[in-house]
Image: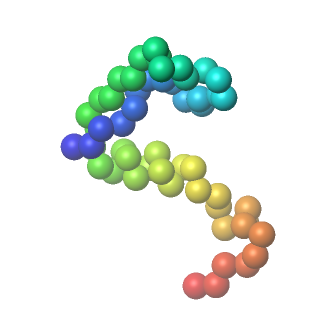
Amino acid sequence: MELVAQRPAEPIMPGTVTPGSELRLVFTEMPRVWNLITELLPSADQLPAPVGR
């Protein structure tokens, strides 16, 4: 299992996290972590240059 931040809530805007802000981590399964990461990546049609495979 992996740890994923539950707090502060996303999206984190500039200036909203301070040294006194709560940080809470929760256990989650690895496939969930990869899904969260890949959701941040642009799709092939959003890339400025064509993607060759």
Q: Quadrant of the N terminus?
A: top left
Q: How many marks?
A: 0
Q: Is residue 28 above or below residue 26?
A: below
- Quarter residue 2 falls in: top left
Q: Is residue 31 above or below residue 24?
A: below
Q: Is residue 28 left or right of residue 6?
A: left
Q: Nearer the viewer, residue 2 or 53?
A: 2
Residue at the outermost bottom position:
53
Q: Quadrant of the C terminus?
A: bottom right
Q: Is residue 18 above or below residue 35?
A: above
Q: Residue 37: give x, y in percent of width and height.
A: 48, 51
Q: Residue 20: give x, y in percent of width and height.
A: 46, 14
Q: Residue at x 33, y 50 (%)?
A: 31
Residue at the outermost right position:
48
Residue at the outermost front position:
19
Q: Is residue 10 left or right of residue 52?
A: left
Q: Residue at x 44, y 23 (%)?
A: 7
Q: Is residue 12 left or right of residue 5?
A: right
Q: Nearer the viewer, residue 21 or 8?
A: 21
Looking at the image, what colour scheme do you see? rainbow
Q: Is residue 8 above or below residue 1?
A: above
Q: Is residue 42 left or right of residue 23?
A: right
Q: Residue at x 77, y 69 (%)?
A: 48
